[in-house]
Image (spheres, grey):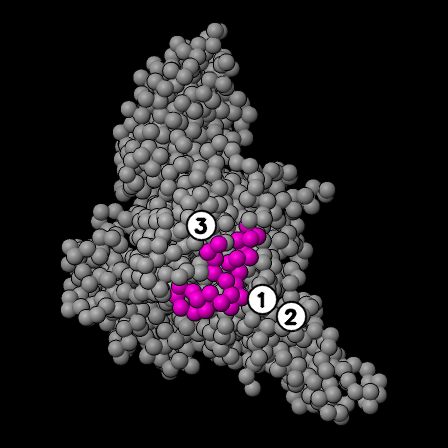
Amino acid sequence: MSFDAKYKAQDYNSVGTRPVRPDGVDKVTGRARYGADFNMPGQLVGRVLRSPHAHARIVSIDTSGAERLKGVKAVVTAADLPDLTNGDQTLFDILDNCMARSKAFYDGHAVAAVAAVDAKTAREALKRIEVEYEVLPHVIDVDEAVKPSAPVLRDDVFTGGVEPKPQTPSNIANRSEFGHGDVDEGFAEADVIVERSFRTEQTHQGYIEPHACVASMNPDGTADMWVCTQGHFVYRQNCADLLGLDVSKLRVTSSEIGGGFGGKTHVWMEPVALALSRKAGRPVKIVMSRNEVFRASGPTSATSIDVKIGAKKDGTITAAQATLRYSCGPYEDIWGEFGAKTSFACYGLKNVKSVGYEVLVNRPKAAAYRAPSAPMAAFAVESTIDELAQKIGLDSIEFRIKNAAKEGTRSSYGPVYGPIGIGPTLEAAQNHPHMKAPLGKNQGRGMACGFWFNFGGQTCTDLNIGSDGTATLAVGTVDVGGARASLSLVAAEELGIPYENVRAVVADTASLGYNDMTDGSRGTFSSSMATISAARNAVKVLRERAALTWDIPVEDVIWEDGCAKATDKKHGNLPPLTIADIAETAGKTGGPIAGHSELVADGAGVSFATHICDVEVDPETGATKILRYTVIQDAGKAVHPDYVEGQYQGGAAQGIGWALNEEYIYGEDGRLQNPGFLDYRIPVCSDLPMIDTQILEIPNPNHPYGVRGVGETSIVPPLAAIANAVSNAAGVRMTHIPMSPPRILAALEGESEG
Amino acid sequence: MQYERPKSLMDAASLLAGAKGSAYALAGGTDLLVIMKNDDFDAELVVDIKSIEGLDEIRETSEAYTVGAAVSCAALGESTMLKEAWPGVVEAANLIGSTQIQGRCTVAGNLCNASPAADSVPALVAAGAKAIIVGPNGNRTIPVEEIPVAPGKTSLEKGEIVEAIQLDKRAPQSGDAYLRFIPRTEMDIAVVGVAVSLSLDDKGLVTSARVALGAVAPTVLLVEPAAEAIIGTKLDDAALERLADVCSAACQPIDDKRGTIEFRKKVSGVLARRAARIAFDRAGGK
Amino acid sequence: MSAIAVSTTINGDEVEFLCQAEETLLDVLRERLGLTGAKEGCGTGDCGACSVMVDGRLVCACLVLGAEAEGRSIETIEGMANGDELHPLQTKFLEHAALQCGVCTPGFLVAAKALLDANPDPTEEEIRFWLAGNLCRCTGYDKIVRAVQDAAQELRGS
């Protein structure tokens, strides 16, 4: 029976409260086990040798010196990870990124790995691997890479999405286009047009926990892995595919995860750990250093974006157009496409066109980073919108409200919107005291909007009722920031039992059906849907058992306040049976009581936010201080409001870092110069003010409680909101992110931006 | 690698002098342990000097204060005596790294690490601080600015150890200050650092001054024309502008991941102005 | 190469261990003593996830050699609660939802306790600058600062 996920308004007992999270005590006492906190008997230390070159042909690798070193148990290269991908280009690219085959494509690209008895031996072994490189010309910059003169990374990549199909290889892997109407016509109708070019630098998710895994592969083809990941089922699939294992014979257990933000949705060294374990015949643990995390895992794209928007004097946008170039690292991806799709999603537009390009450069493979690609597009578009409003002489919020998308609007990327939150968040911003607070000298205010799709996807949960009427909930979406608390609340709500009587765990891949990973803001949305479904299935069983106990038709048994109650007077005044009463006798009424759910959570409601930011810019140094910050976002329904606020605040803080100081800095040699937290400058505690939040609840029609994902949208508006604030404070339009002090000072001095 | 924890300075010096390969003195370790993480790091010997008696003490004599090489910057920051005499030096030392780093790092270590961007060094140079050095060939005391000779390189001979930093007693109506520019509010290496130390006469005119710049040249710069720009003045606007111009002109910076040449030149002038003003106020200037 | 024998005190217990000269205190705590509450986020003193106390000073365990522990007194997150009674900071972190992924939490708690032991009534600015060496990428620090403020108030008994 398919599950009816339609929204129904209801009063809640548990949902919407703020209890302590079930994994909390472990985390404040140091007992929680993260990726690097797990060990297996006989375990070896794995280390990866990485290319020092941005672009080089691997002529030869001599591992014999390392193999001869006492204590070295295995050395692997690409030869030990043979190509089993059967023409699947995406899978091949994952393989090539995990271990370079013919070429090293970036500083940090893995070329070999060792497993040894201890860290010291492993370190010495790496020095004894001799790699002969033929260094090739490299290209780092996204605008340089698209020029005809640029060195071409791949001779097997021809620009997709264009006709006729190109005959020569290119660093532009794909072109995608979205929109409707006729932008030329629209611009002809405009009274005012603003056209600008923007750049954003590459940033890293910056999770505090480096990638870590322990892999153990047995001669009989069974294998186990302990790993910090946002999706252990996806890691299992990727690893099984690359190692040639039966999917079900690889059991992956997700550890507690020390932050991911998209960076732990991709496999990096996990297949290598398995290959080392296979060769050594012992478990192998690999923990990346911070240097490796920056050089060889997960940054987001660097971008170059051109935006043109025209409007009438009354404030109606007549046409909007954007060209977006996103760096992908050496492998084709969909980052430019996401940028193009999200760029104008906040607005109802008659004529709109956005074109995205996937650009290959000699940087690490770009990975998802919280609402991937949307923040850069929003920076470019929302900056242009602000400038346009100023030129027309309209208030920036008024102008946005006038053009905001609403229910029934056909979005710039295709779908027609249902009930959405862009208008309400803008109105809430307009009425927020923050908008009216006075500003001092050298201070400025900015605001901006943001959009994210949100995803649903495949989800599976198990809910088991214990003999005392308490419940265990097993979910397969990794808990990245409090989801076990939210899902326990949902189970408690459905069963009518106290929150404390539910224990939620993240099950391993052998204990539960497949789950997509915790990405796309889907964790609470999809797993709460599956939890509701599983709980309702369990309630059905509970009612059946009560009916059996009472010997009455199940139709006459309702579930209320955690009890089975007989409804019809003809059954006399039967006292209600509590969940504990029913559970206690389960052995005699048909066995264990459980509810299961396997579903595809469709209909993740789109998400919108509006942010307001005040800054002060020191005109003599270009330093920016964030004075005040407010996040207003639609949550659909906030299941555990503390953790919803936490997502809003965390996304804003990451956006602030991106806007002001975070960037990958490369030398002329194509090597990353700041692979550490000292010079990759994420915000510290003293950089930030309190971050105010306002949760709006516009129910998602496709979820029983109206829940929407909340995790990602909060990082979308900050770049633009801060750029608008800085531009207003400094009196000069900032078009290059991050707005580091040297860039602001240079702009103030009227020099060309560096 | 061998780890030793001698009880006396002479033992420490002879251990370091006798090492065949590379050998390091370990005080706070906040720089040494970072480079130890590098896969290419190779040392034969590390000599932990923290068990040497007296090295963790701040002492006062009639002419001077001495800060032992093992005194953590956190401990330095708790010294009321030094905060009153040399507030600029103490605030500079307390800017190094985080609270955690403060619990370990030392000014002697900051000096001997020979980073051009070391926070405490411009303040020490402006203060006219001296380094008391012990070594296999005897002891010597030299101005701190003579220790770093290039990024990561010092003038110390093999086996020599800085035992303590010496700061003179302060003349009345004197003040010092250190300001640095960093992109964040904490945890960064200085992009520009400026220290000013000055004394006033009874009329409130600057009679002597020392101005030092960090992170704008291979070593910390003592800028004598900058001192001249403010001597004889009450730090009027014109004097401060002269000071800023002289400091900007004295910079020999590079473009790197932390800042540009233009930025460093401009901001060194700005910070010199601001630091001079603070030092002047501390000296009781009006 | 022979290992170094070290006698030290950890969370009030006398502990003896052997380590190599290049091993850090963090390596020793995590790999030899099974105290994995302190985390290695960077290994270079930039993130504070390995914060511990050595002789009453807050330090990064990744920047201390294991051999330096000889004769010292070390406190880690594992020693913060009194049996099953959580320290008020631990309780307030839970009540305020001051953690999301939680990997930075042990470091923040150790650092925050060091602050409140030294300064029972810190301003928001003092809290923010004291904790600037502890990186958190999830929370934006808001709820962490509030939890510390609330714990400080409770510890002051007001």
In this orientation, which residue lies closer to the viewer: A354 or A292? A354
Question: Of the residues under marks 1 and 3, which one precedes in the sequence?
Answer: 3
Specify few, some or many for label 1: CA neighbours under 10 Å numbering under 14, 14-19, or 20 or more.
many
Instruction: Tell whether B25 sits left or right of A50.
Output: right
Question: Of the residues under marks 1 and 2, which one precedes in the sequence?
Answer: 2
Please, is residue C35 above or below residue A477 in the view?
A: above
For mark 3, give the secondary structure.
loop
Please, is residue A479 above or below residue C20 in the view?
A: below
Residue ID for mark 2: A9
In this orientation, which residue lies closer to the viewer: C66 or A529? A529
User: Residue A552: percent from the left, percent from the top?
Assistant: 75, 92
Between disc 3 and disc 2, the foreground one is 3
Question: Of the residues under marks 3 and 2, which one precedes in the sequence?
Answer: 2
**Extent of the magenta region:** A402-429
Please, is residue B226 above or below residue A428 in the view?
A: above
Residue ID for mark 1: A699
Q: Residue at x 24, y 62 (%)?
A: A172
Residue A505 in sight in this render: no
User: Residue A532: percent from the left, percent from the top?
Assistant: 60, 75
Q: Are marks 1 and 2 in contact (CB under 8 Å)?
A: yes
Please tell me whether residue A475 belongs to the stretch shown in magenta.
no
Q: Residue at x 32, y 54 (%)?
A: A188
Residue type (three-letter) at the residue carrying disc 1 = Pro
- Secondary structure character of the magenta stretch overall: loop
Label 1 vs label 3: CA separation? 32 Å
Residue ID for mark 3: A314
Residue type (three-letter) at the residue carrying disc 3 = Asp
Q: Quadrant of residue B245?
A: top left
Subunit ID for the residue under disc 3? A
